[in-house]
Image: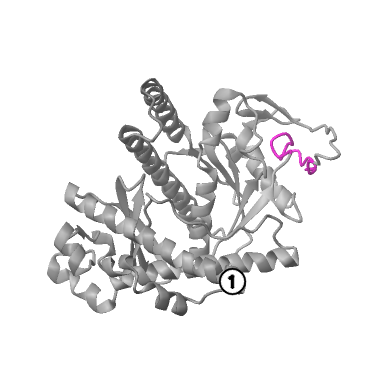
Amino acid sequence: MLTQVNNLRLDRQQILALRQMCHLSKNMFNVGLYNVRQYFFQERKHLRYESNYYHSKENENYKLLPTDIAQQTLKIVDRSFKSFFGLLKLNKSGGYQEKVRLPNYLPKDGHFLLVIPVRKRDWEKLPGKNWLFTVPMSRQFKKEYGVVQFTVPERLRSKTVKEIRILPKYKARYFDVCYCYEDEPEVKVEKTSEILGIDLGLDNFATCVSTTQKSFIIDGKKIKADNQFYNKRNAKLQSIKDLQGIKILTNRQARLLRKRNHKIRDFTNKAARYVVNWCRRNKINKIVIGYNPDLKQRVNMGKRNNQKFTQIPIYTFKDKLESLCQRYGIELVEQEESYTSKASSLDKDELPVWNADNPKSYTFSGKRIKRGLYRTSKGWLINADCNGALNIIRKHTSKPDDFIGGFRGCLAQPLRVLCS
């Protein structure tokens, strides 16, 4: 099942209608959660969806919502509690160390998503309605708030959409629509021994080197500039708020944050897609990506650089890349990356693992002489991030030096790719 997320452009009446429906969905979630929690406190067991539905269907929120949407909300409650019991089992067996907490109620003035199942017969009627999808409503609700309609994107009209979700954003000031659809299975990448190594960074967002002796860099300067603009503008708005004693997120801040998040989502989608398409063209079926458990949490590069680095969407990129890799049959592996920037890949330096409990100092053949330049023992100048990406591959493979040779050119002059 694949998904596509779009922004909804609505008039004021439609926004008010969806805002109220999302508020009712939140109420329905809390009603269902109350029933399940009380049963758990009394019986120490899970109240099944069917029983919860029986107790909840007489509630006023259930009657104001369409039956399908109310039932889907109760099913989300059911899945939340099943996850809770799953974590309890893991906790008892020692597989999960954190404290297991009960699912919590949503805020009184909050909103919750609307999940709309789409039947095949209803989807087949949309071409005759100019592809206008009507959000289902109860008669009483429709009489008070009117109809909400939006156009299905042209790209999805040949697909079979199974579910549509309406997602309230920033206290239901804005709404996104998520289409869940079925698609034809993609052709898998043929099995080879080729590997792509990825070193993640800031200006060079993703430096990629492959065992086919090709390399490229996904440029991160655009997303860095977008974050800088957001921080500067938001700081000015925050100072105005402080003078006026306003504590909540303002409409101007919400617009600014929404625009920034859209740019980040667009960038990470394009970057992940470029990497996967490149692997498919070059018949690479394994990606090794550098991993540092304290990549953002304990980073200390100064106040300004910390702000720039922690806002770069590295984990979002990893999630999108993993999803695309599963779709096309490409294996994605995370590799611990200590000393990969210091060691010389062309000199075949050993790659130790950093041990915080027993730190040691190591001497390597080459040296990083400038911010983006690495000099090997033979005096060759190569891109420092490309050197790190190749070392990530070397650290992952059992025979790290079998493929080294002829790499000097691709390490010195990688292709720079703009994803904007």
Residue 322 percent across, percent down from the top left: 53, 57
Identify the residue at image location x=38%, y=64%: 28
Residue under label 1? 42
The residue nearer to you, when weighing 43 against 297, is 43
Q: Is residue 13 left or right of residue 8?
A: left
Give SS at disc 1: helix
Identify the residue at image location x=62%, y=72%: 44
Identify the residue at image location x=54%, y=50%: 318
Residue 146 seen in render = no
Q: Residues within 10 Å of mark 1 (few under 14, many from 20)?
A: few
Residue 18 seen in render = yes
Is residue 353 covered in magenta?
yes
Residue 121 percent across, percent down from the top left: 24, 79
- The vertical placement of 338 against 278, above or below, is above
Residue 417: quarter of image: top left
Q: Is residue 239 left or right of residue 21?
A: right
Is residue 53 covered in magenta?
no
Residue stretch rendered in magenta on the structure: 339-354
- The vertical placement of 147 against 314, above or below, is below
- The vertical placement of 387 against 88, above or below, is above
The residue nearer to you, when weighing 260 against 199, is 260
Q: Identify residue type, mark 1.
A: Gln
User: What secondary structure characterizes most of the magenta part?
Assistant: loop
